[in-house]
Amino acid sequence: MPTPHVLILGGTTEARRLAAALAERADVRVTTSLAGRVTRPGAVDGEVRVGGFGGAQGLAAWLAEQRVSSVVDATHPFAAGITANAAEAAALTGVPLVVLRRPGWRPGPGDRWHPVDSLDAAARELPRLGRRAFLTTGRLGLAAFAHLTDTHLLVRSVEPPEPPLPPRLEVILARGPFTVADETALLREHRIDVLVTKDSGGDATAAKLTAARARGLPVVVVRRPALPEGIHAVPDVPQVLERLGFRPG
Ligand code: NAP
């Protein structure tokens, strides 16, 4: 029987952990696919390919050429385009698909969350909640805030943002994880009065929510896009391994 070949659609910590778990097994070939948005991505175990496939058809062709036996979509919860393509390519080729999604965050006592459905809706909500906002929604979505002339925007991203940019913008280049102490100091030093975040979930970037709660700040939380119809995600790497039929270790 040929060695099973697992394609991981990556770009997340969970994708890297899954690649590490599969790469240490002799009975499987693992390839991680990265979009190529970040110039210096962290190390990934196993084989790596970089760049788009050319839509669902292109991905389907790649699955057939490379004799992929299973696809794991371990992309970010807001990467809806590649997730839709993965579902379509799986349907076209019959290659089984497992979707890994870390659970979303839940508000706790003391949180002042304002859930919205998009970055545009977040930008509409912002002026009535504060004048100095900390935006942690990523450098690629800044165009949605470009018309806000009266709101000071502090943006943190791994790579510098590109135009169109909001007029009153301050950029901090940094890569998580961040501690509650880091986030509290940042909110205080920059006199932030409102936080904007996507519901990315996970521990690596949750400290800002704890810090905002402690300071009594409102938080605009962008909800996740829905998964394609009929797709049910699993929340962690052990459950992916189980779905793929690999025993742990
Ligand atoms: P997206 O809008 O869903 O995807 C746009 C296009 O980028 C896809 O159609 C595909 O091009 C290509 N692509 C995306 N992920 C790919 C992958 N893992 N391997 C190969 N091609 C990929 O994606 P996005 O929101 O721009 O995110 C891009 C990557 O960054 C994802 O891998 C995601 O895990 C990671 N990321 C995203 C966010 C976020 O907030 N969106 C945050 C952190 C990390 P083709 O159609 O040509 O195949």
Image: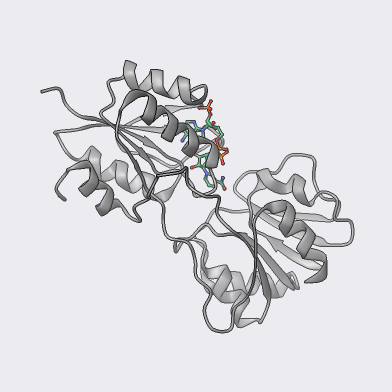
Q: Which residue is drawn at the image coordinates 89% and 56% (left, top)?
A: 149
Give the residue at the far left of this rendering.
1
Residue 73 visible in image: yes
| Horizontal relation, residue 25 to residue 223: left or right | left
Answer above or below: position of 219 versus 238: below
| Horizontal relation, residue 244 to residue 188: left or right | left
**Would you identify the image quadrant in which residue 28 lies?**
top left
| Horizontal relation, residue 29 to residue 15: left or right | left
Answer above or below: position of 234 versus 186: above
Q: Is residue 9 or residue 168 the one in the foreground? A: 9
Give the residue at the far right of this rendering.
149
Residue 130 visible in image: no
Where is residue 85 drawn, in percent x and y?
48, 32
Q: Quarter holding the N terminus? A: top left
Answer above or below: position of 203 versus 141: below
Where is residue 104 drawn, in percent x and y?
47, 61
Where is residue 201 drawn, in percent x and y?
48, 60
**Would you identify the image quadrant in which residue 236 lies?**
bottom left
Q: Is residue 219 or residue 26 the one in the foreground? A: 219
| Horizontal relation, residue 102 to residue 95: left or right | right
Give the residue at the far front of this rendering.
230
Q: Which residue is drawn at the image coordinates 59% and 75% (left, top)?
A: 211
